[in-house]
Amino acid sequence: MTKQRFRAVPYDTPEEVVTEIDVWDKLRYDVRVRVEIKLKDGVKDPQAETIISVCNNSPDLGANMIRTLIMGKYFEIEADENFNIVQLCDRILANPVIEQYTITDIDKAS
């Protein structure tokens, strides 16, 4: 394996400050997924309701133009092929009582 050299700083930086990045260290995963988590239908989201209310009552934020706002979170995970991502989601990342999640294979999606 040949080491490839990438500049991790702007090109006008002196050569002795340039950092070498081993490309092969970045490629040591088998699976790369994106986990998107949002509240299940019917679960109240006071934070989203507040954002809608503030925007709809403010002329400079588009008064009465927002109908729906869904908030959530996402994680991008690189892991070994045998890693149980569903178990990670069920136990740590999401609360299965009030949240739902989708797992997308990033490498296959692009």
Image (cartoon, rainbow, N blue to C red):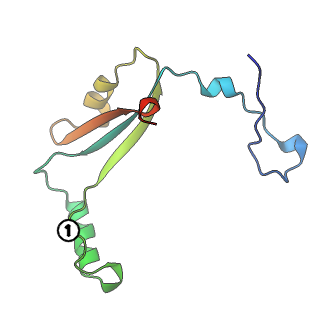
Q: How many marks?
A: 1
Outermost residue toward the left? 42
Residue 56, x across and y down, in percent: 24, 77
Q: In the figure, 31 relative to 109: above or below? A: above
Residue 63, x across and y down, in percent: 26, 81
Residue 107, x across and y down, in percent: 46, 30
Q: Quadrant of residue 5?
A: top right
Residue 94, x across and y down, in percent: 27, 37
Q: Secondary structure at mark 1?
A: loop
Q: Residue at x 35, y 34 (%)?
A: 104
Q: In the figure, 104 relative to 9: above or below? A: above
Kind of residue at disc 1: Arg
Q: Residue at x 20, y 68 (%)?
A: 67
Q: Give the residue number, with chain letter if any, for mark 1.
A: 67
Horizontally, is 78 left or right of 69 in the view? right
Horizontally, is 6 left or right of 27 in the view? right
Which quadrant holds the N terminus?
A: top right
Callout 1: few (<14), some (14-19), or many (20+) C-alpha neighbours within 10 Å? few
Horizontally, is 67 left or right of 36 in the view? left
Q: Residue at x 21, y 39 (%)?
A: 100
Q: Residue at x 77, y 41 (%)?
A: 7
Q: Please name whichever residue, 72 or 92, is drawn nearer the observer in this view of the structure.
A: 72
Q: Quadrant of residue 28?
A: top right
Horizontally, is 69 left or right of 98 in the view? right
Q: In the figure, 1 relative to 6: above or below? A: above
